[in-house]
Structure formats: structure tokens, C-alpha cells
Image (cartoon, rainbow, N blue to C red):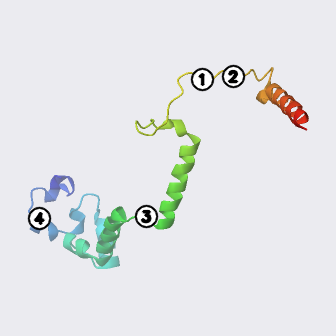
Amino acid sequence: MNIDTVVDKEYLGQTFRALADAPTSALRGVSAKDAKALAQAFNVHTVRDLANLEFVKLAAAITTLAEQEQETPEAQAKETLLDSGVEMTFPASDPVSVDSGITRIEVAPETVSAHEDHQHAGKVEQSTAKGLKAEAAAH
């Protein structure tokens, strides 16, 4: 990052030591009014004071740690359940593994016209009739 992009024009080219001791208004985006408010609220007058402000250090530490924090077991369980639910909804979205033992059906099996034989009702009736005949013959 070019330091000249974060300081006001009058502080361009200054050393880091000089910038650290510069007023907070030296930072681009911190107006004189903002600098006055920082001074009144937190007794912060320089860039160094602002950097050493305990609230700033705590906020920076929390933000840094938040980026590295692992999910709680409860959050992990919820994510796993969500992933499983999505996978069950869209099982064909993942490519089939070479060693999964699953064979893709390349040609759809013959289907019965739902208009003529809804849920294979005709075949069920035929099978039931055959079964009843076989049962009657066995008795």
C-alpha cells in the first residue's frame, strides 16, 4: 500500500515517525471536527494515540481472531444437516465418482403411460389375480 493514499496532502512524503506524531486529522477521512471529537472523547491527539487506544487494539484483535475462529459444534452440525438436505434434494448435481460402484442409467427404462395405467395399477391387479389363483390352488 502506498502511504500517500491514506494521509492528507500536507503530510505526503513524511516519515513514519513523523506521521505517528502527526495529529489524527493527518489521516485522510479524519476531518478537523472528527479530530476534535476524538480528543474530547478519548484524549486522542496524534495518530500514535489513536493506534495505542485500548478500544482500537481490542477491536483489531477481535476482528483478527474472528477471521480465524472455528465454528461451534452446533453451527457445524447445522451446516452438515443443511448440506445433507441439499444433497438429498439435488443428488445428481455431483459427478459420479469413478470408484463409487454406481452405474449411470444411460437409457431410461420403459415407462407405462400414466394415462392408461396409473402407477402400474393394471399390473398390480394382474399380479394379485395370479397370486389369488395360486393361493386357491394350494389349498
Q: Nearer the viewer, mark 3 or mark 4?
A: 3
The answer to which image quadrant residue 123 occupies is: top right
Task: Give the amino acid type for the residue marked by disc 4 in the picture.
Answer: Phe
Distance Cα–Cα, label 3 vs label 4: 39 Å
Q: For mark 1, what is the residue?
A: 108
| Residue contact between numbered discs 2 and 1, judged by CB atoms under 8 Å | yes
Judged from the image, the secondary structure of the residue bearing numbered disc 4 is: helix
Q: What residue type is labelled 2?
A: Thr
User: From what the image shows, is residue 111 above or below residue 80?
Assistant: above
The percent coordinates of residue 45 (x first, y second) are 23, 74
Looking at the picture, which amino acid does disc 3 mark? Glu
Labelled disc at residue 16: 4
Distance Cα–Cα, label 4 vs label 1: 72 Å
Instruction: Judge depth for marks 2 and 3 and give the one in front.
Output: 2
Instruction: Give above or below for 55 relative to 124.
Output: below
* Pointer 2 or 4: first along the chain: 4
- State the image coordinates of residue 4 (x, y, percent, origin top left): 16, 54
User: Type of residue at label 1?
Assistant: Ala
Q: Residue 70 carries which label?
A: none
Q: Measuring from the top left, give residue 93's x and y in whole percent.
A: 50, 36
Q: How crowded is mark 3: few (under 14 residues within 10 Å), some or many (20 or more)?
A: few
Is there a contact, CB below 8 Å, between mark 3 and mark 4?
no
Which residue is rendered at x = 20% and y = 52% of the image? 5
Whole-angstrom CA distance, mark 2 to mark 4, is 78 Å
N-term-proximal mark, 3 vs 4: 4
Instruction: Answer with mark 4 or mark 1, whichever residue precedes in sequence.
Output: 4
Q: How crowded is mark 1: few (under 14 residues within 10 Å), some or many (20 or more)?
A: few
- Secondary structure type for disc 2: loop
Q: Name the residue under label 3.
A: 71
